[in-house]
Image: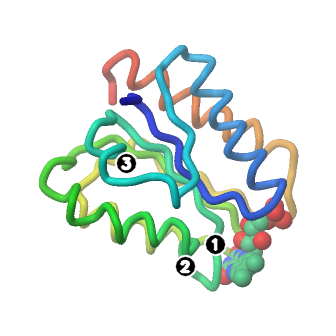
Amino acid sequence: MSQLLIIANTPSPNTLQLRQAVVAGVAATGLDYLELDPSAAHAGHVLHCRGIILGTTENFGYMSGAIKDFFERIYYPCLEQTQGLSVATYVRAGLDGTGAINSMERILGGLRWNPVQEPLLLKGEHQPVFLEYCRELGEAMGEGLKLGIF
Ligand SMILES: Cc1cc2nc3c(=O)[nH]c(=O)nc-3n(C[C@H](O)[C@H](O)[C@H](O)COP(=O)(O)O)c2cc1C
């Protein structure tokens, strides 16, 4: 099983690039990782990893349905055994992002996972610098897990 999961919905070419940039950052650290669509991720993956990077678009003022479905499927199977799991999040929003951030934070709080940094909010028109931020996020999480900081 992989040490770090990267799970994000990618409804557009831009959002696919964001996830790929996160993966490139993790890969640069040499940490063992697994990139997954939310629909392919299940409790078995989560139970055997050391950290997760979760990415979502903001849709209708909430996290994406794909990420919500992921949480619904893994919540109870993972609740007892994954407390303290390191997690980092990023949100891609056209206008706002707070609804997606707040809704994810509530569920992460319920799971008692450990956010290792503030959510990364990528808001407005797509910009190339978003890819740098995503790469940095992946690199920071990969290094932190490798060094045992997270
Ligand atoms: C059905 C739907 C609902 C959306 N709702 C929101 C929203 O509530 N808040 C927001 O900031 N953006 C919203 N958006 C914009 C998405 O977050 C945006 O399409 C996504 O971040 C991908 O952007 P990009 O591919 O143009 O980079 C919505 C998009 C769709 C398709």
Task: Report crowding for label 1: few under 14, some 14 to 19, many 20 or more residues within 10 A (C-alpha).
Answer: many
Q: Quadrant of residue 95?
A: bottom right
Are the residues flagged by discs 2 and 1 in contact, CB closer than 8 Å? Answer: yes
Q: Residue at x 46, y 39 (%)?
A: 5
Amino acid at dot 3? Pro
Q: Residue at x 75, y 55 (%)?
A: 15
Are the residues flagged by discs 3 and 1 in contact, CB closer than 8 Å? Answer: no
Q: Is residue 12 visible?
A: yes
Name the residue that disc number 1 marks: 58
Amino acid at dot 1? Glu
Q: Secondary structure at mark 2?
A: strand
Name the residue that disc number 3 marks: 115
The residues bearing labels 2 and 1 have C-alpha atoms spaced at a distance of 6 Å
Q: Earlier in the sequence, mark 3 or mark 1?
A: 1
| Residue 21 percent location from the top left of the image | 71, 36
Q: Number of labelled discs?
A: 3
Q: Secondary structure at mark 1?
A: strand
Task: Report crowding for label 2: few under 14, some 14 to 19, many 20 or more residues within 10 A (C-alpha).
Answer: some
Amino acid at dot 2? Tyr
Q: Residue at x 55, y 79 (%)?
A: 62
In the picture, the disc for residue 62 is 2
